[in-house]
Amino acid sequence: MRRASSVDDFIAQHPRWEPVLRKLRAILIGTELRETIKWGAPCYTLDGKNVVGMAGFKEHCGLWFHQGVFLSDPDAVLINAQEGRTKALRQWRFTDAAQVKIARVKAYVREAIDNQKQGRELAPERGKPVEVPPELQAALRRTPGAKKAFDALSLGKRREYAEHIATAKQDKTKASRIEKILPQIAAGVGLHDKYRSC
């Protein structure tokens, strides 16, 4: 799917979820948050900081609370979509517009805004050593110049590559991912660099 150029474009790309997304958008634009597009999806910011995002998937759509770990979640609706990897982000999933209870959603968004104003933010871990999976280590050793190029990357970029390989469940997937990332590593490009300027 191509990256959306506007919120209306994003909603048009998710026709199944249009009623839900429009209802959520109406709530979000009724706040002091600024509507923008980041990573090809709607993002709502306060003083340049990401507070809430909207997303559409095959089985659901929903809200991403960028610092959702700090939300009280009285209705127990928030989930960590990538347990063990995602620290601060929390997701609220919807499959029908009737599930979007306006007062409930507004309360969560208000709390997220208040948390942002108070500076409540889970900072990323810095300086944590990179654990390079054995499969990636072997590929870097056998590919001319790859180890040197990998070592020249920033710690964060090396970590992204290592986690990308480590999270693959099957050996076949690991091998496929390694084949795709070796040219990026050789070019000194990070795994997610194409999204960083969004």
Image (cartoon, rainbow, N blue to C red):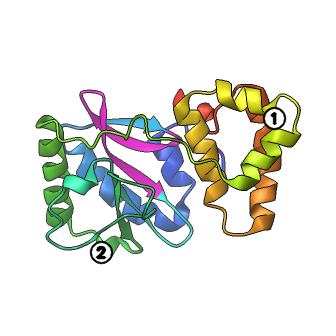
Residue 99 is labelled as: 2
**In front here: 132 or 154?**
132
Neighbor class of circle 1 (other Cα within 10 Å; few <14, some 14-19, many 20+) is few
Q: What residue type is labelled 1?
A: Pro
Residue 55 visible? The answer is yes
Q: Residue 162 appears at what percent x and percent y?
A: 62, 47
Q: In this view, does 198 lie to the left or right of 172?
A: left
Neighbor class of circle 2 (other Cα within 10 Å; few <14, some 14-19, many 20+) is few
Identify the residue at horizontal 26%, vertical 54% (top origin). 68
Question: How far, Cα to Cα, is label 1 from label 2?
Answer: 45 Å
Q: In this view, does 11 lie to the left or right of 27?
A: right
Marks 1 and 2 in Cβ contact (< 8 Å): no
Q: Residue 86 appears at what percent x and percent y?
A: 41, 55
Identify the residue at horizontal 83%, vertical 48% (top origin). 179
Residue numbers of the magenta segment: 39-55
21 shown above or below 44: below
Q: Is residue 27 left or right of residue 160?
A: left
Q: Is mark 1 on a helix, strand or loop?
A: helix
Whether residue 109 appears in magenta in the rendering, the answer is no
Q: Residue 58 appears at what percent x and percent y?
A: 57, 68
Whether residue 44 appears in magenta in the rendering, the answer is yes
Front disc: 1 or 2? 1
Residue 135 is labelled as: none
Q: Residue 172 appears at what percent x and percent y?
A: 81, 65
Identify the residue at horizontal 18%, vertical 39% (top origin). 116
Q: What element carries label 2?
A: helix
Q: Is residue 111 left or right of residue 154?
A: left
Task: Report the label total.
Answer: 2
Q: Earlier in the sequence, mark 1 or mark 2?
A: 2
Main secondary structure along the magenta-highlighted residues:
strand
Q: What residue type is labelled 2?
A: Gln
Question: Which residue is identified by label 1?
Answer: 183
